[in-house]
Amino acid sequence: MPKDNGIGASPKRREDVRFLSGTGNYTDDIQVNGQAYVHFLRSDIAHAKINGINLDAASAMPGVIKIFTGADFEGVGGIPCGWQVTDRHGEPMQEPAHPVLAQGKVRYVGDQIAAVVAETLEQARDAAEAIEVDLEELPAVVDMKAALADGATKVHDDLTSNLCYDWGFVEENKPAVDAAFEAAAHVTTLELRNNRLVANPMEPRVAIGDFNRATGDSTLYTTSQNPHVIRLLMGAFVLGIPEHKLRVVAPDVGGGFGTKIFHYAEEAFCTFAAKALNRAVKWTSTRSEAFISDAHGRDHVTKIELALDAENNFTAVRTDTHANMGAYLSTFAPSVPTWLHGTLMAGNYKTPLIYVNVKAVFTNTVPVDAYRGAGRPEATFQLERVVDKAARELGVDPIALRRQNFITEFPYATPVAVEYDTGDYHGTMDALENMADISGFEARRKASEARGMLRGFGVNCYIEACGIAPSNLVGQLGARAGLYESATVRVNATGGLVVMTGSHSHGQGHETSFPQVIAEMIGIDESMVEIVHGDTANTPMGMGTYGSRSIAVGGSAMVRATEKIIAKAKKIAAHLMEAADADIELKDGSFSVAGTDKSVAWGDVTLAAYVPHNYPLEDIEPGLEETAFYDPANFTYPSGAYACEVEVDPETGKVTIEAFNAADDFGNIINPMIVDGQVHGGIGQGIGQALLENASYDENGQLLSASYMDYAMPRASDVPFYGVDHSSQTPCTHNPLGVKGCGEAGAIGSPPAVINAVVDALRSGGHDIHHIDMPVSPSRVWQAMNG
Amino acid sequence: MYNFDFEKPSTIADAVSALGTEDAQALGGGQTLLPTMKQRLASPSKLVSLNGITEMHGICTGDDGALCIGGATTHADVAAGAGAYPGLAGLAAGIGDPAVRARGTIGGSLANNDPSACYPAGALASGATLVTNAREIAADDYFQGMFTTALDEGEILTEVRFPVPEASNYQKFEQPASRFALVGVFVAKYADGVRVAVTGASEEGVFRWTEAEAVLSGTFSADAIAGMAPGSDGMISDLHGTGAYRAHLVGVLTRRAVTAAS
Ligand SMILES: Cc1cc2nc3c(=O)[nH]c(=O)nc-3n(C[C@H](O)[C@H](O)[C@H](O)COP(=O)(O)OP(=O)(O)OC[C@H]3O[C@@H](n4cnc5c(N)ncnc54)[C@H](O)[C@@H]3O)c2cc1C
């Protein structure tokens, strides 16, 4: 009998009622009394010197309140970067200034030159067209390798070059890794690109700044995954507003995928302008604007080498990656190709020696930062592609080669600084082999061939580090923030609970899954628990949602706070039943005295806490409200095995995904339906990256795929019904729920399976092809087949 | 979007006179024009909606057996109502998505003559007659390159007359992002010969692939044009495919259309 309440049940998502009935409260739904509107004049040139800006005509236009330029922000802080990477030589990365509005130069198409605040949005847009900007075009830096060449134009004149950092990991291992390659029986090499992506959350970004002249308080309403982080970064580093004078509200948010983690200039602008003008100021991004103002994802160019001994054991991995930072450092950009990427290069394998080199490069393109998976998809893609290629070169079964090299003993300390607590890679591979009907593949291939189609099968494994992250560890690695999470659990007098969490839900379903945990712990119905999130005014300082951290870190904080609640409630119950604290048991929402038939209901205890007439006031305070901050002891390590089956039309190059199966180990699972949904969405995005999506710049720094006319998003008809299995569960050993997180797995695990399958299909058609870069569009596949 | 005036006349004559205002523009389904205006790339002084003109809606059969479609008829109505010409109904059913088909019109599509649009291939392959408020124009004279047609300023496409072929088929290979035609080929077989029109491929817009027509008019089979493709000179090269790829697709899709029509 499936449970219908508590951990393991699959209640429908309660938040969907408002999302699907148009009654959600998104940032753009918020109307502040007297709000004015801002339109940003953005550069349409990738790299230029600003010789002058003439606002005379524009300022005189109807409805214009004020036009701001970079000059208005002199003396105001720049947009900060939240992570400092130290390079191979022990030097800090190069960190350019990032002004709120461009000063002196524009550095990418989309860089904001001026901000027009007007009574209406159309008036602001009209006036922006009347601004005269004298731009002197400079050569655009687009290609990363060219950006590092001697004499290359510099994106930032005050830096020594376009190199942000040259990172080696683990630097001390390099000689041993090189020696292992010298001694290898076989070396497989692969060069590839991890394509640049636009995040495309359904809701574009919005920011509203508000200022209360009576109290001197500022409020920012914004589409953010982490309002407290924005409050800290913007308050402390940009505008100099202390936290107690600044409130940040991130109400319903329509998807983030990483791109709403970061602190953006538009947020700082609206908050600043609201105070300067004593008017609320609202900005709503258009979809076109989102393409050139939201941080992009991925964009790595990599060479990976795998060394094997004569028995096909992996002996070493060596990689060389160029990672595009874009024109400025977005909030967590430096961490993505380093600590979220290099630390994952062991994958699921016991490779003893690993060396990762990453050169992060400034270019005249939109800043690049974390996007669903962030660094881990890039690591997984290159590793699982090179393992597949090695299997082909050696003539061995790709699954057998993987199994032979699997890590089987846990905990396992990798040579890249992380320790996997648990996992069962054979277990997930067994589950995958069952689902994917591998023995039937040859018959399916024959049937495809009979129809003139090529059929391919591809498999891959993945490991990710999520539940981000132990604060002391990330501090050593350069994070300028802690990565704990918080929760306040408030029990009301009549027994209902409100959880104020520092996690933020923007599609993940926390309002449904978090109450399931508390329902399980207390033995009450989920409907008695409400989740509050997204407002710094009524939630404890938290770090927000990304890195599949909400249930593993935020959920753990909630468990710790609830444990405190239960401990106190037991004391009250003991008093009410005149028994010893230690004898009190809580089950099904009722407290009883062990070995007796005495009991008192949850609601009687909570009422006593707030109406303490018969209450141990000498021992404990009235009330029932507890806060906990939880700092994880380690990352969590979800893992899995994915398989994709494709058909390729040899005449047109079109790839069709015929089947996709995913076996994941997420440890314990709170709501299987929500987990299925997270995996489905992740695979959809992974297939999008593999088949369709590509942010493509021309040599002048113009984004060619700057709208849905040219940027291909996956649609329902592009994906099959997925097979999803999470029966293989090795609970996390270091958090109270034994959970690992599931938000990014699908996007991390799926691209290599697709490409492995496409290569397999093409090879079955007699094409001597080892690799095709993503997205494997029809024209690329046809090109590959036809030289 | 800039400000504009709006009129919704109920007769063609009123529409023509409303379009006499400087920078006035006809509005069909708005599926091309409105997004362009929202991006501030078009700034008509006045929009004259053709939607209220009853005689421009609907499908009928002319005395000569031709299928006559009113210029303001939506793609959805053609998909549902052009059963007498299955190739054309199929073309209309494959345009955009249900929302686009519910608004977009045949007149708007043909007046716009997007180089990746579907209807131009259908009209050219059918040797259709494009009827305006002022004259009748043969399809062979009507399409004059990307986004360019024989229509004069303020001229309204009121009806399109399609001779119904013995056999026909439209093959659309979708551009992955826009889902317009990366290449689309319409093949129509008439008693007096086969016509093959290609959209999406050429920098000159929709065109007839006369080499294939000549062969297919003799033998209407895919084998007859095996290995044939037009030259890649003048073919569109962009993010989604080179000219050579498009030229290759023209051959593939023509064969598929012939097979499907046979
Ligand atoms: C998401 C999306 C997907 C699409 N996919 C496809 C596709 O796959 N294939 C395809 O072919 N098209 C596609 N389209 C375009 C669609 O078919 C439009 O309907 C068509 O391009 C224009 O028709 P309309 O009636 O909307 O014209 P409008 O946008 O109203 O007008 C377009 C132009 O034609 C003029 N005009 C309109 N009607 C007349 C008339 N009767 N006489 C003279 N001039 C007129 C207008 O003044 C304007 O210049 C797509 C559009 C969208 C938004």
Image (tube, coloured by chain):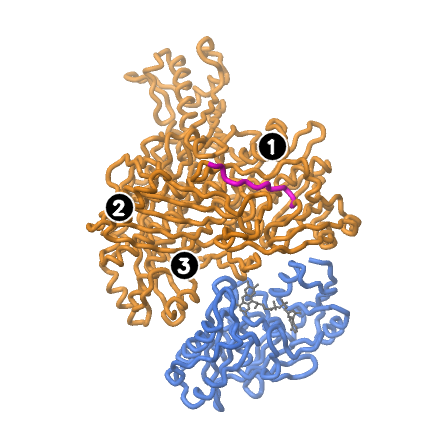
Q: Colour of chain A?
A: orange
Q: Residues within 10 Å of mark 2 (few under 14, many from 20)?
A: many
The amino acid type, in three-letter code, at marker 2 is Thr
Mark 3: amino acid: Asp
How much space separates mark 1 and mark 2, taking CA atoms? 49 Å
Label 2 near label 1: C-beta < 8 Å?
Answer: no
Disc with the residue nearer the chain's start (1 vs 2): 1
Query: Front-most of A96 and A428?
Result: A96
Locate residue B51, reporting x and y percent. 65, 68
Amino acid type at mark 1: Gly
| Mark with earlier residue (2, 3) | 2
Q: Which residues are magenta?
A: A91-102
Q: Are marks 3 and 1 on the same chain?
A: yes
Query: Is A72 part of what is drawn in magenta?
Result: no
The answer to whether residue A655 is seen in the rendering is yes
Q: Quadrant of residue B226?
A: bottom left
Characterize the magenta stretch by its predominant secondary structure.
loop
The answer for how far apart the CA atoms under marks 2 and 3 are is 26 Å
Q: Which chain is blue?
A: B
Of labels 1 and 2, the one closer to you: 2
Same chain for the residues under marks 2 and 3 in the image: yes
Label number found at residue A555? none
Q: Does the magenta-highlighted stretch encompass residue A96? A: yes
Going from N to C along the chain, the mark reached first, 3 or 1, is 1
Q: Chain of mark 3?
A: A
Q: Which residue is mark 2?
A: A315
Closest to the observer, A302 or A269: A302
Determine whether label 2 and label 3 are within 8 Å by CB. Answer: no
Residue appearing at x 48%, y 87% in the figure? B190
Disc on res. A773: 3
- Residue A574 is situated, as x and y percent measured from the top left of the image, at 38, 14
Residue A747 lies left or right of residue A255; in this view the side is left
